Amino acid sequence: IASHFPYDFNLLKWQCLVKFTRVPVIIETCGNPLRSGAGKLPYLQIGIQKFVGYKQIKQLLDKENYAIDAKLPKKAKCLSQTFTTWVFSNLNAYYYYFLYGDPNNYEITRSLYAKRTPFPFNFYYPSSYQKEAQDIILVMGGFDINDKLEAHDRDYLISKAKKCVTTLSKRLDNKIWFFGDDFSEFDAIVYSYLAILYKTNLPNNPLSNHIKGCGNLVNFINRISRDIFQKESFNSINTNKDGVDPNDPLLTATERQFLESEKKTKILAGIGAVLAMSAFAVWRGFFKKFSSARQYYDAYNTDDMMDEEME
C-alpha cells in the first residue's frame, strides 16, 4: 500500500484499517499519487491490479475475511455506522477548514505535503487538497474560504466540533474501545480525526486544547499511537532536526526513509536550479554577444552609407 502523508484523515483511516485487522501488506510511505492510476492516495496493489481509496480497499479486505467489524455484534455494527455518520457531520468541516482553509494553518500543512510528495508534483498536490476543502466547507460550513477572513464562520465549526468531542468522551468513558473489548471501524475513524487535530502543531487549532481536557480521549489516542503505530513514528522529533544522520540507530525505518527521500528531493531541486541558471547564463551570454555583433554590424553599415553619400 502506498501513502505519503500521516496527517491526512483518509490516509490515517486506511492505515488503522490494515493495522487493526493485521493485513499482511507492505506500507510504502513515500508513494507517488500518479502511480495509483487515479492521481490519489492511498492505493493497494496486488500484482498489476490496483485498489484506490479507502472504500475500494475496505471492500477488498471485507471480501478477503479481514473485515474490521467482524467481531462486533449486529447491534453494535448498526450503532457504529450511525455514530460514524454523526462524527462525520460534526468534525469533517472543522478538520478541512483548520488544516486547509485557515490561511495561517495552510502554510504549515502545504509544506508538510510538499516535503513528502515527489518533485515536481509537490507544487500541485497541496493546492488540490485546498480545493477539495473549499467544496466541503461551502456545503458543510456554509461559507467560502476565498471570502474575507471576517466572513468565515469559525464559531459554528468550533462549537459543533467541541460538542462532538465532549459526547465522544462520555461515550468512551473508561472502556478500551467505543463498543467494549473489540475494535471497530468507528474507533479507527475517531482516532484518525482526533489524533490529527490533537497532535498536529498548528498556529490556530482551538479543538486541540478541548481534546486535551478529555483525559480518556487523550489516553485513547496515545495508546493507539504507541501500540499500533509504534514502528511508523510519523511525528518523531528526530525528523524535525537539521543535520540528522540517516544512519542513526535511533531512527525508525520510516523516519530513515523519509530523510533519504527528503535528501533526494533537495538534490533534484538543486540540480534543476543549477541547470536553469546555467541555461539562463548561456542564453544571456549569447544574447549579449549577438547584440554586440549586431551593433558593430549596424555601425559599420552606417559609416559605409555615409561614405557612399559623400562620394
Image: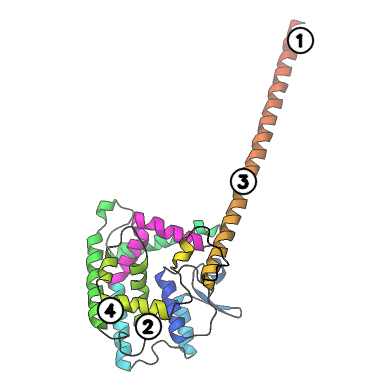
Q: Amino acid at mark 4?
A: Asn
Q: Earlier in the sequence, mark 2 or mark 4?
A: 2
Label 2, label 4: how far apart the Cα atoms are:
19 Å
- The x, y position of residue 11, in whole percent, is 44, 72
Task: Residue at 55% x, 71% y: name it.
Answer: 249
Say whether marks 4 and 1 touch (CB < 8 Å): no
Assess disc 4: are there few (<14), some (14-19) or many (≥20) residues with their C-alpha within 10 Å of its C-alpha.
some
For residue 185, the mark is 2
Which mark is in front, 4 or 1? Answer: 4
Which is the main secondary structure of the residues drawn in magenta? helix
Say whether marks 1 and 3 touch (CB < 8 Å): no
Task: Residue at 76% x, 10% y: name it.
Answer: 308
Label 1, label 3: how far apart the Cα atoms are:
47 Å
Q: Earlier in the sequence, mark 3 or mark 2?
A: 2
Within the magenta stretch, is there residue 112? yes
Question: Which one is in front, 254 or 71?
Answer: 254
> SS for tag 2?
helix
Q: Amino acid at mark 1?
A: Glu
Q: Earlier in the sequence, mark 2 or mark 1?
A: 2
Label 4, label 3: how far apart the Cα atoms are:
54 Å
Task: Residue at 36% x, 58% y: name it.
Answer: 105
- The x, y position of residue 135, in whole percent, is 36, 63
Q: Which residues are magenta?
A: 90-118
For residue 276, the mark is 3
Task: Residue at 48% x, 80% y: name it.
Answer: 57
- The x, y position of residue 149, in whole percent, is 28, 52
Question: Which one is in front, 90 or 309?
Answer: 90
Label 3, label 2: how far apart the Cα atoms are:
49 Å
Question: Which one is in front, 158 or 229?
Answer: 229
Disc 1 designates what residue? 308
Disc 4 designates what residue? 216
> SS for tag 4?
helix
